[in-house]
Image (cartoon, rainbow, N blue to C red):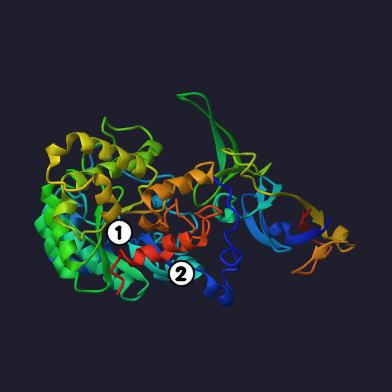
Amino acid sequence: MTLDAPLTAEVEGNRESPAIAEVRLKIIDGDVHPALRSIDDLKPYLSAHWWEHLQTYGSRKRSGMQIEPYPKSAPRACRRDAWPDDGSPPGSDLNLIRSQYLDAYGVEYGMLGPLGMSGQSEINVAFSAVMTAAVNDWQRDFFARPEPRLKAGIVVPYEDAEASVREIDRCAGDVCYAQVFMLTRTGDPAGNRRYWPIYAAAERHGLPVALHVFGSSGHPFTGVGWPSYYIEESSGHSTSCQTVVTSLVIEGVFERFPRLKVVIVEGGFGWLPALTWRLDKLFERNRSEVAHLKRRPSEYIREHIWVTSQPMEEPDNRRHLFDTIEWIGWDRILFASDYPHWDFDDPFRAFPAGTPRERFEQVLTRNARSVYRLG
Amino acid sequence: MPRHVVAKLSDIPPGTRKLVHVAGRAIVVLNVNDELFALSDRCPHKGGSLSRGTLTGMVSSPEPGTYVYQRPGEILRCPWHGWEFDVRTGRSWCDPKRLRLMNYTVSAEPGAALVEGPYVAETFPVTIEDIYVVIQTK
């Protein structure tokens, strides 16, 4: 919990003033969530058969004991001030996204990450494939084409790698799409070879792979069963993310795909330095078990992994936050707001006072240019 | 001690709130069961607008498994990250010393008394027939 003072006079200035907007830093946001007004939005993109299937059988996810994920702290896990006047879901009204977020803060690009009825985590992999394709078309038509500041993520039915590759190949030629979008709770740890075709396709097309927290695999959130509280689930994302990073590195994904870029989204980042140190230590003692790794785990992490800022750790002493980022590397942190979700980070309030201006600019804009396909 | 007329009392009936701007400050005025409160609108945590927040109660617990819901309608929860503020003091529950809202003196006063001054009625005329909400800025 940090008491934030203004970073500089200009960034805390009047948001309405165009003169001030010009000198403010540009923002590239790694995590913006679009929403369906209703499931009918997907109807034009589903065949008669699959629409009928959806109406008749609905979504059946690999949910385990995670039956109904909402409300989490707030209805639809959203900011209470992000609901359009007509009562449709936050994130479904492009005009409100523009006025409340893109225009108000001067956002240059926002990366879309569809959650919920996005076709991911479905048990029926054929249904998963058609739903993700429909969601990709919907993102393009409802958001990315009419609003070039919003970039779609190619949502893939990742439990079926072949279908995922087909979907990446189908979408990648369109500059509306800036990344491949997966969730951290995969059926097997993300570095498992059955997912490798997805990474191969992403690398081939020059697209980063975002792994956003959530999803449901059927496995508990923790390594030892189902916790009772949402706070436990929220803090548990850091352990899911550690599994993702460890698996990608140790399985040799980055050895096999040397140009692959991975962004861990919404998992915080305070855990990353300690994980890196531990992996290096274990590697030095057990290297022969994973002889396919040519370098220390820390080197793969430093080269291939980025983390988004939100929901940022907020230590009482801000120096501890700066130290943590130093250990990770200021060039590896990408700003994310999570708009319109309840734990939204205001780009100009998220980082504590005392953040060096050039570092802030790196995180807010510059790092993202080397990660996402923005052209 | 400037005093500002910010609304007619009838504009803020019980159970509602109104965002007003006084001398460059955004202030949320709440009417809780005919009792008025005026607090700074900007959440000191990360800047959410409290006028868009939820008015709720205070859950406390003497021990795990036992829960008590008290003071319904007296806790204002930020629409973003859910920080809880006591409308009577402006203090947050989690960090009452550091994270607190400015708590303004607010009252309902008859127009007949106000037309005499020294009040600042910035945006609308005051008539003696009505009752007005008056905020005092320090």
Residue B110 or residue B21, whichever sits in front: B21
Residue A36 or residue A55, whichever sits in front: A36
Residue B4 falls left or right of residue A88: right
Say which mark, if any, is on residue A114.
Answer: 1
Q: Residue at x 46, y 65 (%)?
A: A101
Name the residue tied to disc 2: A26
Residues under numbered marks 2 and 1 in contact, where contact means CB atoms less than 8 Å apart: no
For label 2, the SS is loop
Residue A309 or residue B12, whichever sits in front: A309
Output the chain of dot 2.
Answer: A
Residue A296 falls left or right of residue A337: left
Where residue B47 sits in the image (x, y, percent)? 56, 55
Where residue B81 sits in the image (x, y, percent)? 49, 48
Report crowding for label 1: few under 14, some 14 to 19, many 20 or more residues within 10 A (C-alpha). Answer: many
For label 1, the SS is loop
Q: How many marks?
A: 2
Where residue A338 sits in the image (x, y, percent)? 40, 56
Say which mark, if any, is on residue A39.
Answer: none
| Residue B125 visible, this angle | yes
Three-letter amino acid code at disc 1?
Answer: Pro
Q: Residue at x 23, y 45 (%)?
A: A296
- Residue A276 sits in quarter: top left
